[in-house]
Image: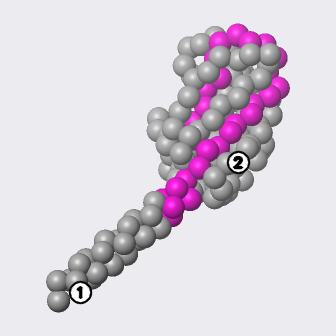
Amino acid sequence: MLRNVIILFIWLITGMAVLVAQDSIRIKKSSGDLTLLIEGFDNEQGKVKIALCNSEEDYDTDSSAFQVASLDIKDTKVKYIFRDIPFGDYAIKVYHDEDNDGKLDKNLWGAPSEDYGFSNNARGKFGPPKWEDARFIFDTNNDTMQIEIK
């Protein structure tokens, strides 16, 4: 009888360990790293500002984003890795903050006077591209996106 109880206990512990291991594997596969390569800078002055948005609401505002970064430009390029990003829909906005004032400068007509870019290299006709044009699905452990800033 005691032998049967011990065997049952070992069987339960082994089964629970297998389930926990399967959940760990599933968790690891539900996020990954996204490498962002940005090219096309005219100079290395100031910073490049990056916003990774995980909803249309975040994308349509300048005040919130899922993750943000402010980076130096080296050799007229920038490489940045978003680590452990949950799988899902995203869009990326970037701009070259040449004067390092923390905002995208605009001319008298409201058009940007500093270079900018979006995921999928999307462009808008009168204003930024729509979420649907810049949106991409992130669903792999390692992916790379390239943005040409203009």
Q: Is residue 79 left or right of residue 21?
A: right
Front-most of 2 and 38?
2
Q: Is residue 1 left or right of residue 84?
A: left
Part of the protein shown in magenta: 25-52
Asked if residue 35 is positioned above or below residue 1 in the image, the reply reads: above
Report crowding for label 1: few under 14, some 14 to 19, many 20 or more residues within 10 A (C-alpha). few
Q: Which mark sits nearer the N-terminus, 2 or 1?
A: 1
Instruction: Point out which mark residue 143 bears.
Output: 2
Q: Is residue 74 left or right of residue 99?
A: right
Question: Rounded to the nearest whole Å, what is the CA distance between mark 2 and mark 1?
Answer: 50 Å
Please tell me whether mark 2 sits on a helix, a strand or a loop.
strand
The amino acid beneath tag 1 is Asn
Which residue is labeled 1 in the image?
A: 4
Question: Whole-percent x and y of residue 94?
Answer: 66, 32
Quadrant housing residue 125: top right
- Is residue 1 one of those drawn in magenta? no
Question: Whole-percent x and y of residue 123?
Answer: 77, 43
Quadrant housing residue 16: bottom left
